Image (spheres, rainbow, N blue to C red):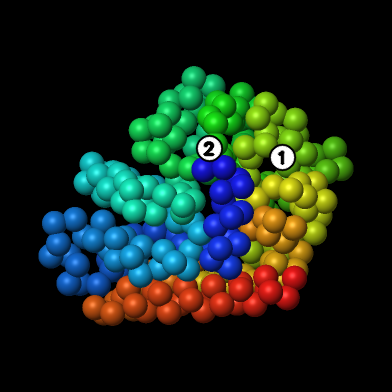
Amino acid sequence: MTTENLISEIQKKKSFLCIGLDVDLEKIPEHLLKEEDPIFSFNKAIIDATHHLAVAYKPNTAFYEAYGLKGWQSLQKTIEYLNNNHPDVFTIADAKRGDIGNTSSRYAKAFFEDMNFDSITVAPYMGQDSVEPFLEFTDKHTILLALTSNIGAFDFQTEKVNDQELYKKVLQVSKDWNHSDNLMYVVGATKVEYLAEIRDIVPNSFLLVPGVGAQGGDLKEVCKYGMNSDVGLLINSSRGIIYASKGKDFAEAAATKAMELQQQMESILNAS
């Protein structure tokens, strides 16, 4: 998917909502456990109920890897369902990969070619040659971890290197990599006070922003400091939407929560 396609979808739906499909069998409704593939059944119901409200879906691969081969099969079925039924929706493999060049090439082929995701999250710690193999793919996007929403982000990301915070160095240096126009960045909603400076460095890039909802991030504040002329934001909510109910009405409850966020986003877009 091109960036222009994503922007068009945002404009059409008046939404920049990303729904995280982080499926825990201990949290999904009990009646689904009788299904042949409970994870896929859960995802399909959530997608069917919310696809008109979201522009992106983000399965965190750890929640599938935890269940071994069956989990990977559920992930494969989920991405195939999205691509076949909702090809205009942006898909994110939240895999946080990143390794020496030839290994990164294999990761990129796995997620971009075999599974046909539109994007993947990548850790930048190993530097340029660990990221550029992902950037070589046409109309695929690499979402680089910049400033994350967890408490441990302060261990390294905000520490200064030659009088510049490490996350700023990541942003600045990555702009000069080959095919850097395929880069997006992860910036946590709980780090809203940093967004204005981040926008100074990457004014035109899309930011994937987790942490709105269950983690306490404020949507209006994120938009105030992080939105650009193309919106430039994908606001992710996972637990707050997909686990809105543990009953048979779980999909309807998820749609209600997703609509609440979408309507807030529409209001922000109309006011901008």
x%, y% of residue 142? Answer: 57, 39
Q: Earlier in the sequence, mark 1 or mark 2?
A: 2
Kindly state the secondary structure of the residue where label 2 is placed: loop
Q: Across the whole image, how many numbered discs are drawn on residues? A: 2
Image vertical order of residue 216 relative to residue 75, above or below:
below
x%, y% of residue 134? Answer: 54, 31
Q: Residue at x 51, y 79 (%)?
A: 260
Q: Quadrant of residue 100?
A: top right
Q: On residue 215, which mark appears? A: none
Q: Residue at x 54, y 73 (%)?
A: 262
The amino acid beneath tag 1 is Val
Image vertical order of residue 86 relative to residue 160, above or below:
below
Q: Which residue is mark 1?
A: 170
Q: On residue 140, which mark appears? A: 2
x%, y% of residue 258? Answer: 47, 73
Q: Is residue 153 visible?
A: no
Front-lying residue, 198 or 82: 82
The amino acid beneath tag 2 is Lys
Q: Spatial distance from mark 1 to mark 2, Cα to Cα?
A: 20 Å
Front-lying residue, 73 or 151: 73
Q: Is residue 29 visible?
A: yes
The reply, left or right, for residue 272 in relation to residue 144 is: right
Q: Residue furthest top?
A: 102
Q: Residues within 10 Å of mark 2 (few under 14, many from 20)?
A: many
Kindly state the secondary structure of the residue where label 1 is placed: helix
Front-lying residue, 215 or 115: 115
Image vertical order of residue 76 relative to residue 257, above or below:
above
Q: Residues within 10 Å of mark 1 (few under 14, many from 20)?
A: many
Circle 1 or circle 2, nearest the eye: 2
The reply, left or right, for residue 163 in relation to residue 124 is: right
